[in-house]
Image (cartoon, rainbow, N blue to C red):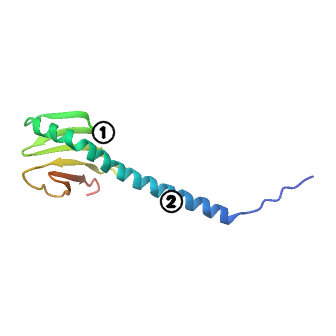
Amino acid sequence: MTERIRVERPALRRAAYRGSAILAALLVVALMWGEDLRFAHASGDMEAVARTLGRGVELRDQTIGSLSFEFVRREDQQVYFYRGKDWGGDGYGYVWSPASQPSDVRQVEGPWYAFRDDAHQ
């Protein structure tokens, strides 16, 4: 009877794990960079929507440029473009606010700000 001898290759296994980790890191960076690129292409169309959106109007399930939004709504002088929830359950999106900077946001460019709603607070 023939016996098969199994040879362990820890170096090969480590290389596979490292390769997987590098690929996962590249995917995360590409997704973040992709969101920035899509925003850059969509921001002009988003501004046109923000300027024409009436007080008290809320748009649901909108695609503007290359970004999709669960809702878009005006609150006073600010227009919120809500993208949805990320993998951690936090809501996120953009705010168009030409008059002033809203609180708890990060400026993206010009009158555009990014926001996150922490679901864990």
Disc 2 secondary structure class? helix
Give the mark nearest the N terminus, 1 or 2.
2
Q: Which residue is found at the position 90% from the left and 53% from the top?
A: 2
The residue most toward the bottom is: 11
Q: Which residue is found at the position 28% from the left and 53% from the top?
A: 119
Kindly indicate the quadrant of the structure image that contains residue 63.
Answer: top left
Amino acid at pointer 1: Ser
Taking 7 as reference, is 42 above or below it?
A: above
Task: Give the numbered dot on residue 27.
Answer: none
Task: Give the numbered dot on residue 22.
Answer: 2
Residue 87 point in image, percent of width and height:
37, 50
Q: Which residue is found at the position 10% from the left and 35% from the top?
A: 52
Q: Is residue 25 left or right of residue 97?
A: right
According to the picture, the residue beneath numbered tag 1 turns out to be 66
The residue most toward the right is: 1
Q: Is residue 21 left or right of residue 66?
A: right
Residue 118 point in image, percent of width and height:
26, 55
Amino acid at pointer 2: Ile
Q: Residues within 10 Å of mark 2 (few under 14, many from 20)?
A: few
Residue 46 point in image, percent of width and height:
20, 40
Q: CA distance from mark 1 to mark 2?
A: 28 Å
Q: Is residue 54 left or right of residue 33?
A: left
Q: Is residue 36 left or right of residue 48?
A: right
Q: Residues within 10 Å of mark 1 (few under 14, many from 20)?
A: some
Residue 94 point in image, percent of width and height:
21, 48
Which quadrant of the rendered structure holds the C terminus?
bottom left
Taking 64 as reference, is 40 above or below it?
A: below
Disc 1 secondary structure class? loop
The one of 103 and 99 positioned closer to us in this rendering: 99
Kindly indicate the quadrant of the structure image that contains residue 62.
Answer: top left
